[in-house]
Image: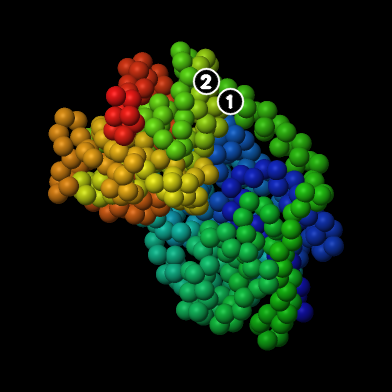
Amino acid sequence: MRRLLILHTNDLHSHFEMMPKISAYFNQARRNWPSDQVLTLDIGDHMDRMSPETEGTNAIANVEIMNATGYDAMVLGNNEGLTFTPDFLRNVFKENARFPVLGSNIYERATHLTPDWLLPSLIIEKSGLKIGIIGVTAAYPAYYELLGWDVTDPYEAVKTLTEQLRPHTDLIVVMSHLGLPMDRRLAEGIEGIDVILGGHTHHVLEEPLLISGTYLAAAGKFGQYAGHIELAYDPAQRRIAQFQSRVVPMTTGSEDDSSVAALLDRFRIAGAAALDEEVAQLREPLRLDWYGESPLGNLLAAGIRRWTSADIGLVNSGQLLQGLKEGRLTRGRLLDICPGPINPCRMLLSGADLLQALEESLLPEFMEKPIRGLGFRGEVLGALSVDGLTVEWDSSRAPNERILAVHVGEELLDLGRDYVVGTIDMFTFGSGYLSLSRGKDVVYMLPEFIRDVLAREVTDREAMADSHKARFIDKMSFDARG
């Protein structure tokens, strides 16, 4: 029997506090196994630009800690592929990574070739076995094309590469940043895959799934677990004879790798220094309210409207985590209050769909709704912040009947007309307000995030002054005051 230990992680999303624990666990496992019998893989989304260490060091912190942990390979996740430009990724991986990076279904759009810092597949020899490694990432063509990539059907990529590698290898391992439903489909439909290591949907498989002869494993998210697989391969029968898989909790009391902890301390200092760059000097504070109108929400909505050259700007106030004090404003502070990798976009939206979203935004069940995924890094959806609109409403009226009139500029909202709306990509996927996903002719604007929009707005004195002007006028409150 040829024995093999596979250690794997996925979806760390720059939770650096867990990385010394993961490295310590990997080192402990390596001490118990011959070094040539250990394979260590990451299944993508290691990097997340909400982290000061990642943002402040241009993701070098992630790569250097992966080097120190001793990864044998990783696959690009959508968080790497969609929040960094291709040139940026080339520089950080080509100059710093001491491990191969796989992208089996991603190509340069101009040449339709795999770039020189990516590999479509890889054969690694461990424990006398030739192991074919395939790495695929979730396909978001509309986004990737804007960044200069072509991203192809991952199922077809895995099928083609499995057929190519199978005659030359003993085992086929797929690093799948696709999600559990797609992993099941790969296992059911493609013959010849031995192991699928999953990610993207943050699922935890405490025990392996066995589907059509393929083993599936996954280790959750944020470094809460490390994946641990022990297998025995029978060369005579050319098959896996034994397979045990588990996830190991990386608990608070777990041992830390002191060398990785020291690296992390260094990168924390370097990241903080880089993010101390001044963006603006604020003459007055900018208040934020998740459950109503506020100057900071208005400023961001106005900035998105201008950024996208739209008639109307819309953004949920929950994208912003805190208000801003007067005085010195830095890149780091903007990252603190607006950490999500959310991109502006432009669409055509009907007046009827716009009115529905505005009505819903006045309801507590929408404002208090927790949101997960699609780049959101806040706690609740919050109210809608708007620009280019004036909304007259009556808080005493029944839900979904509170809006009395909406003016777009000087004109009354026409329910049958399409308006050019600047908003955020998250809404186009149905997160938050279903009516905002019905927009047409959507244009995503990459690579800038909405915090880049905000950075421009805080330097504009006129925009700052306008942010204090009310967009929502409660006629009930107005009438009560006389």
**Residue at the extreme top:** 283
Image position, residue 321 (x, y; %): 52, 35
Q: Amino acid at mark 1?
A: Ala
**Which residue occupies the foreground of this view, 418 or 14?**
418
Q: Residue at x 20, y 35 (%)?
A: 407
Residue that carries the numbered disc 2 in the rendered image: 325
Quadrant of image for the N terminus: bottom right
| Residue 183 to residue 270: above or below | below
Q: Secondary structure at mark 2?
A: loop
* Left or right: 241 in relation to 96: right
Q: Secondary structure at mark 1?
A: helix
**Which residue occupies the foreground of this view, 316 or 10?**
316
Q: Residue at x 78, y 55 (%)?
A: 25
| Residue 120 to residue 115: above or below | below
Residue that carries the numbered disc 1 in the rendered image: 274
| N-term mark: 1 or 2 | 1
Q: Amino acid at mark 2?
A: Lys
**Residue at the extreme bottom:** 237
Q: In this rendering, does residue 446 appear at all?
A: no
**Residue at the extreme right:** 32
Image position, residue 224 (x, y; %): 68, 54
Image position, residue 362 (x, y; %): 37, 43
* Left or right: 308 in relation to 330: left
Q: Residues within 10 Å of mark 2 (few under 14, many from 20)?
A: some
Quarter of the image holding residue 230?
bottom right
